[in-house]
Image (cartoon, coloured by chain):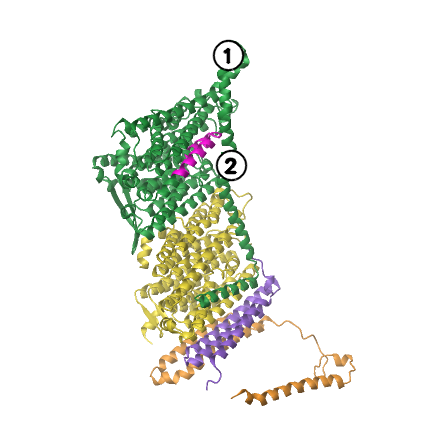
Chain colours: A green, B purple, C orange, D yellow
Amino acid sequence: MASTLLPFILLLPFVGFLLNGLLGKKIGSEKAIGTIGTAVVALPFVFAVVLFFEMLGAPPEGRTMHVTLLSWIAAGDFSVDFAYQLDQLSMIFLLIVTGVGSLIHLYSIGYMHGDRGFFRFFSYLNLFIFMMLNLVLADNFLVTFLGWEGVGLCSFLLIGFWYDREFEGTAIKWTGDAAKKAFVMNRIGDLGMLIGMFILFSQFGTLKYAEIASGLPGSMSAEMMTIATLCLFLGACGKSAQIPLSVWLPDAMAGPTPVSALIHAATMVTAGIFLVARNAALFSMSHTTMAIVAGVAVTTALIAATVGLVQNDIKKVLAYSTVSQLGFMFVALGVGAWTAAVFHVMTHAFFKALLFLGSGSVIHGMHEEQDMQKMGGLKKYMPQTYKTYVIGSLAIAGVIPFSGFFSKDEILASAFANGNAILWGVGALAAFCTAFYIFRSVFLAFHGEERFDHTHVHPHESPATMTIPLWILAVLATVGGFLGLPIVLGEHVHVLHNWLEPVFAQASANMHGHHLSHTLEWILMGVSLSIAILGIFLAYRMYVKRPELSDRFAGSFKGLYKLLWNKWYVDEVYEEAVVKPVWKASKSVLLKGVDKGIIDGTLHGLAKLTGEASNLFRKIQTGIAQQYVLVFMIGILVVIGWLVFGGG
Amino acid sequence: MHSIPLSYYLILSVIIFLIGSIGVLTRRNAIIIFMCIELMLNAVNLTLVGFSRFSGDQAGQIMVLMVMTVAAAEAAVGLAIVLSLFRNKETVYLDEVNLMKW
Amino acid sequence: MTPQDYLPLIVMVLTGIAFGAVSIKAHEILGPRRPSKEKESTYESGMQPVKTAHERFSVKYYLVAMLFILFDIEVVFMYPWGVTFQDFFDQGMGTLTLVAMLLFIVTLLFGYIYILKKGALKWD
Amino acid sequence: MSEHDFLAIAPITTVAVFSLIVMLVDALVKKNTSLMQTLSVVGLLGGIGVAIWTLPKSLNGFNGLVAGGGMTNLFDILFCSAGILTVFLAKDYLERLGGHFNEFYTLLLMATSGAMLMAHATDFITLFVGVELMSICFYVLAGFLRRQVRSNEAAIKYFLLGAFASGFLLYGMALIYGTVGGTGYADVAANAATVEMPFIFWAGVALMIVGLAFKVAAFPFHQWAPDVYEGAPTVIAGFMSTAGKAAAFSAFIIFLNSVYGSGVEGTDRVQILLAVLAVGSMFIGNVTAIAQTNVKRMLAYSSVAHAGYMLIGLAAGSPDGSFGIIYYLIAYLFMQLGAFAIVGLLENEKGCNLTFDDYKGLSKRRPGLAMVMAIFMFSLTGIPPFAGFFGKYQLFKAAIGAEMTWLAICGVVASVISVWFYLGLVIAMFFRDSEEKQAEGGTLGGLSTAALAVAVVGTLVIGFLPQAIYDLLS
């Protein structure tokens, strides 16, 4: 069954890419193009569901299927096939990619309506899906790498889709530059991945995940293992926007919103997590690497979250939030909570896609306005968008019973259990910021007085093709969490955990992580929940409540308002004492200092350095032949000297 | 018979070769530079003949013939190139020919 | 032969150089010098000198010169052929060797036809 | 003499004979351009045919002067294909630039046969003759647009530096000949280990490596390449940077194999030397290319870098390495020649349309060309699944196999640097709009289209079905 369906799952999107790409101009009608584009992703989703149930039917150990489409390279010792491995892990990613993917395709029909590049857009999206499927279904590094580069290419094409638009990014002006930045950043990551692949190949003589895992530890020394895994992690950092390669993602928002939702929130950016999870057995061999992963991840999570506090561009908020959430996932990987990471990938795909599409619907309704300062009070103009957006926000903030709560809580719990209190504390702080900034965006955009001028802007609800996906995602974002109910509720309630257990058995054995006492788990759960509530409450205070209060205060000095006065005073104190400092810190230190200063600075510095070197080298080329002769002669002397006397 | 040892031939040819290459390095006139290159080729010929004479292996001398022919062909082509350059640029000085650089 | 045996040679060379130098110098010292226009002018065996000797030659000279070099140098390959032909002939490979040389010459002939038709040898 | 001798040189003979025929046609027949083109293509195809025919045999002719069959014939096929593509591209280009003289085809065929002779040579004499035959034709071809000063300059620089370099090459041959007592590679392989004067022998090897490194344009003997490629007619630059490089590498491989095979101690020094040259070429080439504003020159510098990648294969000194080089050369042939072809198509009489600015908004003006160019750029960058990636992969794998992982890593880093300028061009073509009206380049003739199509198909096929190439090579 799998062997018959898998080829279709893989090739349909590619067919769609060819159809839309080559004949798109001829077809012309947006309806037809959109239908093709969506169908070639929706059908694979259906097939995937079929396969999923078939897999459910099979016994846990018999659930891994290998399908070889065609032999790609077979050079003597070394052979790579277009071979695919469908096991529990890749199944989840397959479902996410095709499921969320088809919803976003549907949404794009409405969103991209009337764009002159309509067919181009859909062909790129289809190509992206094809590459992404290669990435997650591959059974060896090379096919993954093919997909890896492919998705990078597509994201490059899609970020620069509106290349003629100016764009306010970090140190860049045009969307084209954003695209290039993303691409170059990713290549730096790929460099790491390639080196890692080379090391593994030289050690194991194969690039198949299964064979490498079974061959562990092979002849590799611990240091070698650490180096290899770190190289792979560098690749993951590039794709999944972890520090120091994180800066491209916020700029990637230059692309159309569906792209941000699909590629830069739900699927592509999670490729890094997939890579680590897929090689969990490998990573678990090196505790150094694991520690570094956790450290980098938690730093990213916190910094990105705090930077998110002060963004006014709604998509920027979501972008930093994505970086921070990816940080959470890597924390989970770093402490060996593989399941939790995948779980969060899933829930995040739901609610973040939801939030992005919601913001897209807002931007659409506001005539391409992205600044939240120029919004407000949209609640009554676009009720559906509002409702769904709030659901998404509750989910990401981690309010029970929305999906985000369960996954995030599991991550924090395992961080506490297998990592240490600091890891947990920083994570919790990041979670707090998350709740705050996301609801800040809710209140700024949908509540309060309307700060846009009604003469030009007429907010309106989006068409059904856009709202339907919103609702579907909203439902998923609500109930998605029940796949991973906490263990404390019973041994087998964590469906996902039981599902993935066989995949991570080997890795977990290496990690020998310990469990928390149930009471402690309850406590942690309560803490993380209260953190979320607190953040929301604070945002509420600052962006909804306080204005009214101040008005009333201006209105009268009556004593019966003393309480309110005091409360307001308390508010003020609270704000002065806590919020303002955090605000300032995040604005000055983190945003300017770390994000733009150090990280961005370093990379631009590198680029600049290369440029300087380039200018230096070209000056050597004086254009005068004799000078070439001189260099030539020097070269000869060195060569002769080395070959004749080099041996001593 | 071999009153003059092989090393004399080799050293002489090295000297001639160096004279040639230094000439290439220092002269500006394309034609003179080319003459220096011919000088280098002939130094090599001397080496070849010397080796061939002392090892009694004829291949070296055949090679010399090849080198001479090739040198002649190169001379013809070279002069033609210099000529066409002179027609366009009115110069045969190599350091004035630096349109393309960096 | 030892270096001493070269002594007479060296003496002779030195003498020659000395003689040349002395005679030139002596002529400068002894000879009377009364320059006049006729004496300064170029000696054209009694004729009036017509025009300056520094003039550009037609590129045709170079062209022909190059072509001459090219075809002249090819002869060099016939010497070894001529030397070894007898041996090959004795081994009964005479015809083969002859054909080889003929092929060589025919190839040259192609070149010759080419320059002829391209008018490289035309003068006016 | 036996039929073996003639079979060994059969591909060369075919092309050479056709070059003479073309020359005579040029001299004797009027209104002959199309006829000459046809004949050239026929001759080159014939060369390919004969090469394929003798491919299975392993030949060794004229008392070890030449070899034939196997890898050698693969190189023949490579050169002839490059020649055919160049002939296709030449017509439009040369006519547009007002330099369409029929000698072009004769010279092209002679250069090709010279390259083939280099690949066949197993003896210093034949190698030298091959090198010079190819180089002399290149000197003329580089200066083929004889009314353009740039073309003249390219020719004079290439000629003087080239002759200078072949002087050293020849000196190296002479010294090796003197020490091993023979001009054949067989003598090298047999006697190198037991030479009386190892210093002289190694000096000879050094000089030969220098000479060949010059021909492949490897650091620090690369400086001629940017100037020559920029000034030479674009189609020729394409041919020189692909077939010329390939020829030099073919000679390089065979010569080094004889040295490595001789079991003389000290070959590790050669490997290290080549590795250093490789790293230097990769970094100098790529880094300098970043600062270029002229696309043609950028390609020239990057060709230095590509020579560096291939030197990795030589440094590895293993069959894997040679295999990787051949594989890379095949991929490189298509992508580099294609890139130069497009540059040539956009170039017009006054040699405009060469800077990055001129390429802005090309996707609007000539969407097809822009797309094709983008494919070549991605392939040259080494992004899978295009041809370039697998070539690099092979070479790096060979390096790792030879315990030179550091070298492979340098290669990867260098190829990451190259993203900068290759992608810069793509950005310019797709994500920028040209400020002012562009001077319109040439039109896309039928032949050029065919050539481009071949190049694209080649790039994609090698990328998507590397298996086919492996089977062909193995």
Position above or below: A395 against D288? above
- Residue D295 in picture, x, y percent from top left: 50, 52
Q: Residues within 10 Å of mark 2 (few under 14, many from 20)?
A: some
| Residue type pointed to by label 1 | Lys
Labelled disc at residue A562: 1
Q: Are marks 1 and 2 in contact (CB under 8 Å)?
A: no
Tell me if I can see residue D29 in this picture.
Answer: no
Query: Disc 2: which chain?
Result: A
Q: Earlier along the polypeptide chain: callout 1 or callout 2?
A: 1
Stretch in magenta = A294-322
Image quadrant where one finds the N terminus of chain A: top left
| Residue type pointed to by label 2 | Gly
- Residue C61 in picture, x, y percent from top left: 58, 73
**Secondary structure beneath disc 1?**
helix
Position above or below: D69 against C99? above
**Secondary structure beneath disc 2?**
helix
**In this figure, which residue is indicated by the disc labeled 2?**
A593
Labelled disc at residue A207: none
Is A270 one of the magenta-colored residues?
A: no
Which residue lies at the image location 48% right of the left edge and 78% below the top edge?
Answer: B7
Is A302 one of the magenta-colored residues?
A: yes
Q: Are marks 1 and 2 on the same chain?
A: yes
Query: Disc 1: which chain?
Result: A
Magenta span dominant secondary structure: helix
D315 to the left or right of A567: left
Q: CA distance from mark 1 to mark 2?
A: 42 Å
C43 vs D374, nearest the viewer: D374
A372 vs D157, nearest the viewer: A372
